[in-house]
Amino acid sequence: MVSRFSVYMKSLEIEERMILKSKLRSACKIS
């Protein structure tokens, strides 16, 4: 359970980073 939870949290962190990168890219395109 603990290992599965840590993997889940890591995947969430990666997803958040990807979303932040895409948001930054779109913001750069707009400006």
Image (spheres, rainbow, N blue to C red):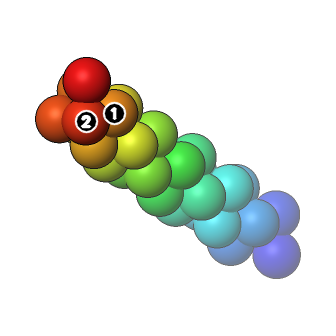
Q: Quadrant of the N terminus?
A: bottom right
- The answer to whether residue 12 is seen in the rendering is yes
Disc 1 residue crowd, few under 14, some 14–19, many 20+, Cα 10 Å: few
Please name the amino acid that badge 2 sits on: Ile
Q: Which is more foreground, mark 1 or mark 2? A: 2
Residue 25 falls in image quadrant: top left
- Nearer-the-camera pick, 30 or 4: 30
Residue that sits furthest to the left in the current view = 29
- Nearer-the-camera pick, 25 or 21: 25
* Residue pictured at 17% horizontal, 35% vertical: 29
- In screen coordinates, is 9 left or right of 12? right
Residue that sits furthest to the right in the current view = 1
* Residue pictured at 76% horizontal, 66% vertical: 5
Residue 2 in percent (x, y) is at 82, 63
Disc 2 residue crowd, few under 14, some 14–19, many 20+, Cα 10 Å: few
Write down the residue under mark 2: 30
* Residue pictured at 39% horizontal, 43% vertical: 23
**Residue 27: assigned label:** 1
Residue 4 falls in image quadrant: bottom right
Residue 11 in percent (x, y) is at 52, 60
- The answer to whether residue 21 is seen in the rendering is no
What SS does tag 1 mark? Answer: helix
Residue 22 in percent (x, y) is at 31, 47
Q: Quadrant of the C terminus?
A: top left
Q: Is residue 5 above or below residue 15?
A: below
- In screen coordinates, is 15 left or right of 12? left
